Structure formats: C-alpha cells, structure tokens
Image: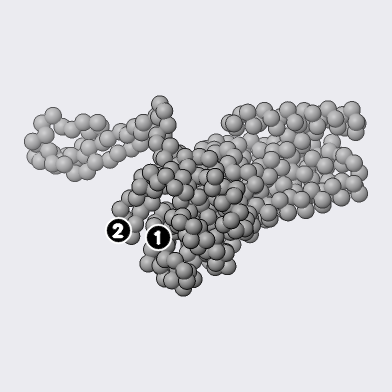
Amino acid sequence: MDLITLIGMFAAIAVVFTLIGKFLFKQGNLPINFLRYFVGVWFVFSGVVKAIDPAGTAIKMEEYFEIFEKSAPLLSFLWKLMAEHALAVSFTMIIFEIYLGIALILGTWKKVTIWLLIILIAFFTFLTGYSAKTGKVTDCGCFGDFLKLAPIQSFYKDVFLCVLILIILFGQKSIKEIFGKIINRGLLLLLTIASIAFAYRNIYFEPIKDFRPYQVGSSIPEGLKLPANAKPYKYENTFIYKNKKTGEVKEFKGTWPQDIDNWDFVDRKDVMIQKGDDPKLKDFAIKDANGEDYTSVFFEEEEYLFFIIIPELKKVNEDGYIKLLKVTDAAADDGKLVYILTGSLIDDMKAFEEKHNKEYDYEIYNTDATPLKTIMRSNPGLLILKKGIIVAKYHFNELTTYADLKKSVLK
C-alpha cells in the first residue's frame, strides 16, 4: 500500500462518518465534519500501527535523540535522558496520538483536543522537516513498519495535516459531541484503556502483526539479493586538477584534462544523482571474532538452527536469558545446533555466557545490532532457522518448553 491509497481509504471512512453524522446526529457544516473525521481516523490509524510495535517506534525515536544530542550539545543532558527512556517516550506518544484521534472523532473536549493536535503535529513536522533537511534519519516511522515514507514525503504529509487541523480549529463551532458527554467520555476512556493494553501487550511479547522484513516464513538468503530489475546507483564524478604552469585549480565533471601531463591531481568528488535499490536485508551478516563472514555457511545447514539473539548486551534481560537457556539447553541435549548472535563485543558476550550458562558454551557470532533489533524486539529472543528460512521467533516472555516447540515447530 502507498500513501495515496491510504489517504483515499481515510477519506472514504470519513465520508461514511460524515453521512452518518448528517442523517443520524443532525450534524451540519459537512466540510468541517468531514475534515474532523478524516484527521481523527488518520491519527487513530497512525497510532494503532505504531502501537503494534512500540519498540520499533522507540528505536526510531532513540535515533532522533542521539542525533539531537550531537546537534544541540547545550541540551545534551535532555536528549540523553530521552534516548535512555525512548520506549516510555514512544509509548506515551503513541497513546496520546490514538487518544486525540478518538477524541476528535467523538467531539469530546474539542478545544483542548484541537490545540493538543496542533502541538503534536508541530512536533511531528519538526522531526520530519529535520529528517528531510539533513537526511540523517531516512525513515520517520510515521506508520511504523506498515508503510515506509521518504523524509520529504513525511514532511509534506505533516504540513498537509497542519493545514487541515488549522481549518478545523477555525471551524470548531460546527463540531458537536456524537453521543453526549457521559457516553462520549466513557467511550473515550474505554478505548484509551484498550489502546494502552494493546500497546503494552506488544512490548512484552513479539508484535501481534509483523510488518518487518524478517517475518516468519521469509528467506534471509533471498532478502540479501537485489530485487529483479533493481535500479542502479548513479554518481556524478568530479575530478579536481591543478595546472602545473599557471597554478589554476579546475574541476572536470566526468572526465579529466586532455593535456593531463600539464596537470596535477588534487581531489575527486562523487555526488549521488540517483539512489539505487538495495537488497531488502542488506545489513544482515554473521561474522566471527576475526570478521570472517559465515552467513552462507549457516544458510546451507539442513537442520534446524537455534539462535539466541542479543542485540545489545548492556540492555539484556538476564531473567529472560536464563529462561531462554532452559529451552536452548534442552534443544542442545536433543542434538540441535545452538548459537548466539550479538551486536556487542564477542569477548563481552563470552564473559556473560560463562557467568550464566552452566551446561553449554555456545559459539558466539557478530551481527550488526540494527538488523538484530529488527528481527527481534526482545533482548534476548530466540530465532529458529532452517536453510536460511525463518521458521519461528520468540520473545522470551512467549517461550514455554522445548518439548512444546518440538511438537509445534520442528516438524
């Protein structure tokens, strides 16, 4: 699905709500009420797709805060604090977004709701504008992993929403509560509590719906290949030379001086003029402590492979790790191959393993933390592969016993 299709879907829902409002609730000023429902549905949908994967939104927000820490050092303490609590910040933002969308649809506390929407969209516009201007964040995460938008698309989207919300602000007199104060506020409370419970569930377990490229059933080897008819990267090469006789420094685009013996090479600049396509899983690789790539070796294995995923050792849940070991140790007893994939230093991981694992010393390999965080939202988590295909993956809170896995997964 693309952004235009999504906007069309929001508009269709808003038309239905507007007609219901006109004929059942006697609402006037159809344009304002259409915009009210359109924006409300937009914010609810945007919040819900992020509530499916709050940890993913937290990763994106942490990326922003780390960049701001370097860009605005006077407030570095604030950005550092926000980065450390990115999950709590993201959770609050997601619930706030859903709450405001529902409140606007219901017409509850309309003045406060509209002003809070203005503040929220101003914050989003700042983030997406910063991304579009600097290019330091390539995806704002506006719709989680459901829909990826280029920074400039995200910025224009937020400017568009800003305009719509300002129109709603000036036409707010036409917005009436749908069911009356008591029912409206009761509904708003119940739906907000349901949103909190839903987002909370998706933090403590793997997301209920997986929009990430590492879905169960997907092939990592296939994801490492370029797509068919992939668009190539194109660069403009500029060569800089200095004339030996005159001292003139001159740039030559795509070529060099014909009388090259009279020039000394100074520098070369390469400017990307067309971004090409990348493999879907371009950052995934399994390497040993010496940096040797073992990725293809694991993909050739005919047996089920168990991988304990630890993106960041400093943030690992030790109780979760111990729980995981009960499953992997039982798998090892049954002759299965078990490994550890970490984004941290292998020596640090070895020390951690020696401290906790009394039965086995699992081989440890490095994979960049970013794809590990994408594969698994828990730290640690369990990934099961067979010939490079993702057979199953589990948050440590979802695991039962190896016997159960053997019955349901290892067929």
Query: Furthest residue to the front?
Result: 334
The amino acid at mark 2 is: Asn
Residue 21, quarter of the rendered image: top right
Q: Residues within 10 Å of mark 2 (few under 14, many from 20)?
A: few
Query: Furthest residue to the bottom?
Result: 355
| Element carrying mark 2 | loop
Q: Which residue is drawn at 42% across and 44% down?
A: 302
Q: Is residue 146 visible?
A: yes
Q: Quadrant of the N terminus?
A: top right
Q: How far apart are marks 1 and 2 (CA)?
A: 12 Å
Counting residues from the start of the chain, the first of labels 1 and 2 encountered is 2
**Left or right of 177 in this view: 361:** left
Residue 247, quarter of the rendered image: top left
Q: How crowded is mark 1: few (under 14 residues within 10 Å), some or many (20 or more)?
A: many
Q: Can residue 371 be seen in this view?
A: no
Judge whether 225 appears above or below 78 on screen.
Answer: above
Residue 388 position in % (x across, y down)? 44, 43
Task: Identify residue for label 1.
Answer: 364
Task: Identify residue for label 2.
Answer: 290
**Left or right of 108 in this view: 382:** left
| Labelled pair 1, 2 in contact (Cβ < 8 Å) | no
Q: In which quarter of the image is the C terminus?
A: top right
| Element carrying mark 1 | strand
The amino acid at mark 1 is: Ile
